[in-house]
């Protein structure tokens, strides 16, 4: 089971990586997109959606949700 704190930790790690590798022209956009409040809200939504989901789909859903934070994914 994915807990809120685990999902929030994944989002924080992804946001930190995103900020570190961001181009200077996208700094403001990325900073606004990765505030603590935005990450907490996103984590809460992800956990709510996971509640009704079968176990095999949960992992891919979380990975895709984390990936969408920073860039279009190839999955």
Image (tube, rainbow, N blue to C red):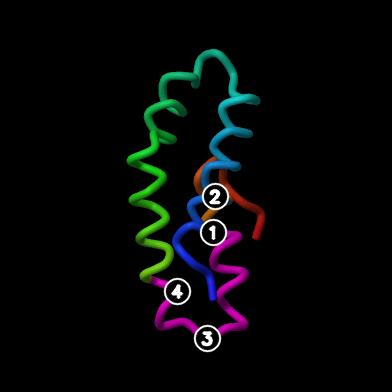
How far separated are the C-alphas under marks 1 and 3? 18 Å
Residue 17 lies, with reference to residue 7, above or below; the image says above
Query: For residue 49, which quarter of the picture?
Result: bottom left
**SS state under label 1:** helix
Residue 19 disc label = none
Q: Up-down: is 57 above or below 2? A: below
Residue tagged by mark 1?
6
Residue ID at (43%, 26%): 31
Please tell me which of labels 3 and 2 falls first in the chain. 2
Query: Which residue lies under the disc numbered 2?
Result: 9
Report, in whole angstroms, how far the alpha carbon at label 3 lies from the one at label 2.
Answer: 22 Å
Residue at 61% across / 51% down in the picture?
73
* Residue 7 as seen in the image, left or right of residue 51: right
Q: Mark 3 or mark 1, which is nearer the start of the sequence?
A: 1
Q: Along the polypeptide, which appears first: circle 4 or circle 2?
A: 2
In the rendered view, would you say 7 is above or below 26? below
**For mark 1, does the 10 Å Cα neighbourhood hold few (<14), some (14 to 19), or many (20 or more) residues?**
few
Looking at the rendered image, the quarter that the N terminus falls into is: bottom right
**Marks 3 and 4, how far apart at CA:** 8 Å
Q: Residue lying at the far bottom in this picture: please name it.
A: 54
């Amino acid at each position: 089971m994915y807990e809120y704190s685990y999902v929030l930790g994944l989002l924080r790690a992804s946001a930190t990586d995103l900020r570190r590798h961001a181009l200077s022209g996208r700094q403001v956009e990325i900073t606004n997109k990765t505030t603590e409040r935005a990450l907490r809200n996103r984590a809460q939504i992800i956990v709510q959606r996971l509640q009704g989901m079968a176990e095999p789909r949960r992992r891919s859903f979380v990975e895709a949700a984390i990936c969408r934070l920073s860039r279009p994914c190839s999955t």
